Image (cartoon, rainbow, N blue to C red):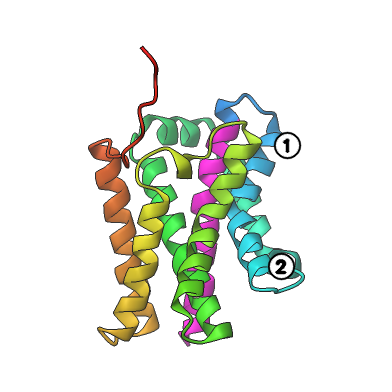
Amino acid sequence: MFTITNGIFAMQIIGAAAFALTGAIVGIRNNLDVFGVCIMGITTAVGGGVVRDVILGQFPPEMFINPIYALIGLGASLVIFIPSVRTFIQGEGYFITVCDAIGLGIFTVVGAEKALELYGDNYFLAIFVGVMTGVGGGLLRDIFSREVPIVFRKNIYATASIACGLTYISSMRLMEASTVQAMIISMGTIIFIRLIAHIYDLNLPKVNDEKE
């Protein structure tokens, strides 16, 4: 029988797999070995959840209690080593962007929902935790690969996560949507924003401080 809990669990599995693929691809691009690629994938898959649980004071973090998320991350990372799969993923320009948007959307709404469950209608906390859950894995991925995190520099990333969190809360409180409906609306919003930003190379304004 379908329940909200089962739905959220399924979404986290999908999100972990999607994020793991992005992390594994970054590992391959950085010429890491099999172990390194798997660590990058797993870190991207579960990093945001660990950050979320630390902020909310949930110890030990869920990934250490239920290893399914790390195992999903490992499995998705190993799939990358199949030549045909890797060729498809690297050749399809929108695949990684879509995977990243799916993971970002899922973990943003799951993080926000968990904050609301624990602390009631604290919307600031919910959005903050949602964003940190969404971007946390990517932050760790980029730090491990010695890059400036994408969240700080490219394609309306954290801003899209904030919009997702606001949409989620607004859908439930103003539109009186169910949890599942609000999640679907929010994820649709973030996927749309990320794809538009990718297609048109949209970024937030930057300060050009170069001296002539």
Residue 181 in the image, given as x and y percentages of width and height: 32, 78
Q: Residue at x 36, y 64 (%)?
A: 164
Count of numbered tags: 2
Front in this rendered view, residue 196 or 9: 196
Magenta residue span? 1-27
* Mark 2, residue position: 61
Secondary element under disc 2, as helix, strand or loop, is loop
The answer to which quarter of the image holds residue 29 is: top right
Majority SS type along the magenta span: helix
Q: As displayed, is residue 120 above or below residue 180?
A: below
**Numbered circle sitting on residue 35:** 1
Residue 117 in the image, given as x and y percentages of width and height: 54, 84
Front in this rendered view, residue 37 or 167: 167
Closest to the camera, between mark 2 and mark 1, is 2
Secondary element under disc 1, as helix, strand or loop, is helix
Amino acid on which disc 2 is placed: Pro
Q: Residue at x 46, y 42 (%)?
A: 152
Q: Residue at x 52, y 82 (%)?
A: 5
Q: Earlier in the sequence, mark 2 or mark 1?
A: 1
Amino acid on which disc 1 is placed: Phe
Determine crowd level at label 1: few under 14, some 14-19, many 20+ residues with C-alpha closer than 10 A: few
